[in-house]
Amino acid sequence: MGILLAFVPFFVYVIVERVAGVTAGLVAATVTSAILIFRDMLSRERTVKLLEIGTVILFGGLTAYALTMGAAWTIPAVRLRVDAGLLLVVLVSMAVHHPFTLQYAREHVSRELWNAPEFIRTNYIITAVWAAAFAVMVVADVAMLYVTSLPTSLAIIVTILAIWGAARFTAWYPKREQTSVAA
């Protein structure tokens, strides 16, 4: 649930963008991202996550650019920037040896497992699956941006399937690993 909650700013962006435009959607997503970070800062059970920090920087930067430069991006252009930014956050988390899923997973396991090689490897694999999902979304965004005859519903379907697939894998894979270790 924690990882999926981190995507609320993206859903807020989509809803507000449809109703009030791209810039309003970016502002709403930035505010939502900041609220999630403050919520975690005030909680004793949660910590501020790398993905949440990346999200607020991503939406905040896009919002600042749109407001100061008067950018008039199309929906596919913003989707490409957002999805590429997400992919970058995930890849950087792996490059700095702290896969983004690790912070979420540590909230659900005992402290003794936090540095176990199997636990760390499992989180690298899950993070790589999320990276693949975001890469698929970026490819769909590029296609939508440059092949304007493609229906918008295609990008929506690809996004839903990519996130759904990564979320399902995230729920399934740790259970599979526990079963393998137990056997």
Image (cartoon, rainbow, N blue to C red):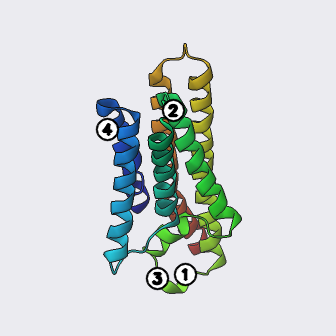
Q: Residue at x 32, y 68 (%)?
A: 39
| Neighbour tally class for label 4: few under 14, some 14-19, many 20 plus, Cα within 10 Å | some
Q: State left or right for residue 83 relative to residue 96.
A: left
| Neighbour tally class for label 2: few under 14, some 14-19, many 20 plus, Cα within 10 Å | some
Percent x, y for residue 164?
Answer: 46, 44
Q: Amino acid at mark 1?
A: Leu
Residue, disc 3: 110
Choose the circle earlier in sequence order: 2 or 1.
1
Towards the viewer: 50 or 121? 50
Q: Quadrant of the N terminus?
A: bottom left
Q: CB under 8 Å between callouts 2 and 1? A: no
Percent x, y for residue 58?
Answer: 51, 52
Q: CB under 8 Å between callouts 4 and 1? A: no
Q: What separation in Å lies between label 4 and label 2 (alpha carbons)? A: 20 Å
Choose the circle earlier in sequence order: 3 or 2.
3
Q: Amino acid at mark 4?
A: Val
Q: State left or right for residue 75 relative to residue 136.
A: left
The residue lying furthest to the top in this view is 149
Q: What separation in Å lies between label 3 and label 1 (alpha carbons)? A: 6 Å
Q: CB under 8 Å between callouts 3 and 1? A: yes
Relative to 110, residue 22 above or below: above
Q: Which mark is residue 113?
A: 1
Q: What separation in Å lies between label 2 and label 1 (alpha carbons)? A: 35 Å
Residue, disc 2: 158
Q: Is residue 138 visible?
A: yes
